[in-house]
Amino acid sequence: MKIFIETPRLIIREMLPEDLEGMFIMDSDPEVHRYLGNQPVKDIETIKQVIEFVRRQYVDFGIGRWSVIDKSTQEFMGWTGFKFNTEERNGHVNYIDIGYRLQKRHWGKGIASECAEACMQYGLNELKYDKIFAVAHIDNIASNKVLQKIGLSKKNQFDYDGEMCNWYEYLVQ
């Protein structure tokens, strides 16, 4: 198991098959998917495929989402990290985006900011990214605040699969 980042409260490591149950708890929660198309996962097989997809991204692109683990309990809390996007969004294709998703019981504790900031610094300092992008539903106030807090700038709004989203960018000067 590869650990990428440690913060005071978190271990951010590669996503593993053992994260299956925690991922299912997170992605089957309708509240978690409120701003993600309102389609929570209904079966654990879908989560197996998600984990396989993420692990395939490690091989294909050298990057992928990482699991967020509570340092004190070793419990899966959610995911964070980067994804190489090959789908067109807002006129962009083949770009790195930063993201995060947490189980609802971990909301409101600063975990999203902590893991996103740690990833942002890792992306800039270790991976030497000079461009990082992100997307957040326009009504997801908490997520929009996190993206701004970690240094991304809102550039515009766009329609993503029938939902209005904000497009964020960080460009190294």
Image (cartoon, rainbow, N blue to C red):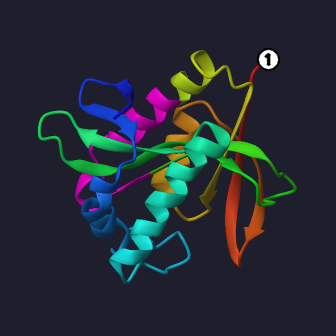
Amino acid type assigned to the residue bearing label 1 in the image:
Gln
Disc 1 crowd rating (10 Å Cα; few below 14, some 14-19, many 20+) is: few
Relative placement, left or right, of 110 versus 147 is: left
- Say if residue 103 shows up in the picture: no
- Image quarter in which the C terminus is found: top right
Which range of residues does the magenta coloring cover? 101-119
Relative to 151, 35 lies left or right: left
Q: Is residue 57 visible?
A: yes
Q: Residue at x 61, y 36 (%)?
A: 62
The image quadrant that residue 118 belongs to is: top left
- Asked if residue 34 lies left or right of residue 159, the reply is left
Dividing the picture into quadrants, the one containing residue 105 is bottom left
| Observer-nearest of 163 and 5 | 5
Residue 97 image offset from top left, x and y in percent = 65, 44
Q: Quadrant of the N terminus?
A: top left
User: Is 168 displayed left or right of 119 in the figure?
Assistant: right
Q: Is residue 54 above or below residue 125?
A: below
Seen in the picture, residue 126 relative to 42 is either above or below; the reply is: above
From this view, report whether residue 145 is shown above or below residue 161: above
* Residue name at image x 40 percent, y 67 percent: 48
Task: Give whichever of 155, 29 is nearer the camera.
Answer: 29
Residue at mark 1 = 173
101 and 15: which is toward the camera: 15
Per the image, is 35 magenta?
no
Q: Position of residue 122 (x, y in %)?
A: 52, 23
Pick whichever, 160 or 143, lies toward us.
160
Q: Looking at the image, which residue is at 59% across and 48% down? A: 57
